[in-house]
Amino acid sequence: MKLIELQDEDLAKFKMLLQESFQYGYESVYGKCEELILPEKDIDECLKKENTHAYVMKNNSIILGGVIVETNEKTQHNHLDFLFVSTSSQNKCIGQKIWGEIEALYPNTKIWETCTPYFDKRNIHFYINKLGFHIVEFFNEKNPEPDWDKDHPMKDEEMFRFEKIMK
C-alpha cells in the first residue's frame, strides 16, 4: 500500500470512487437517493484551487482511497477537503493510514481543518476518536456554512467543523 500523487490516468476512477464513497455514507443513513450527493463539479473546483494536492492510496494498481488537501505555506493552517476509502476497502484502517501519511507529508502544519455532516456518525467517530480532531463549530440553520451557495446539494445538512492542532 502506498500513497502517491494523483495522476491524470487515475483521475476518472478517483472521482468515481470518491463519489461512490460519499453516496454510500449518505444512503446508509437516509436510503436510496437519486441525486448525486457530491457532484463532479465540486470535486473539479476543489482540484483547481491553488495549493491543492490530491493523493491516492494504491495497492499495486488498485485505488483503495484518496485525499484532497489544501495547504497554506504562510499560515500552515491547512484544510482537508476530501478523504475517502473505496466502499470495497472500508473497515481496514486504510483511512487512518492515508491520514498518517498526509501528516508526515506536511510536518509543518499548525492546524488541520475539515468538515463532516452531522448525520454521519461514522465519520464523526473517525475524525475524533481515530485521528484526534476536535469539533469547533456546528453549522446549522442559525449558523450556516458560509462557503456554500443556495444550490449546494448539502446546503440543508447540519455540519461539524473540526480542527486538529498539530503544534
Image: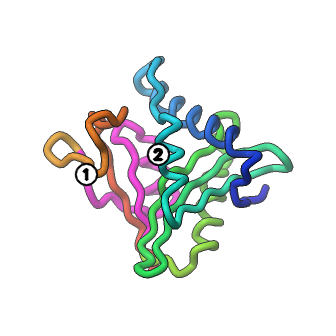
Q: Residue furthest toward the right?
A: 60
- Name the one closer to the observer, 92 or 51: 51
**Image: 26 above or below 92:** above
59, above or below 15, in the image: below
Number of numbered tags placed on the structure image = 2
Tell me the quarter of the picture where residue 88 sits: top right
Q: CA distance from mark 1 to mark 2?
A: 21 Å
Disc 1 residue type (three-letter):
Pro
Q: Which residues are magenta?
A: 111-139
Badge 2 crowding class, 10 Å Cα cut-off, few under 14, some 14 to 19, many 20 or more, is some
Which element carries disc 2, helix, strand or loop?
helix
User: Would residue 17 appear left or right of 161 to someone viewing this image?
Assistant: right
Q: Is residue 100 left or right of residue 109?
A: right
Instruction: Tell me: 18 left or right of 64.
Output: left
Looking at the picture, does residue 50 appear above or below residue 74? above
In x, y percent, where is residue 83?
55, 50
Residue beneath label 1, please?
Answer: 146
**Residue type at numbered disc 2:** Asn
Question: Residue under circle 2?
Answer: 123
- On screen, 117 above or below 73? above
Q: Position of residue 13 (x, y in %)?
A: 70, 38
Between 34 and 21, the one nearer to me in the picture: 34
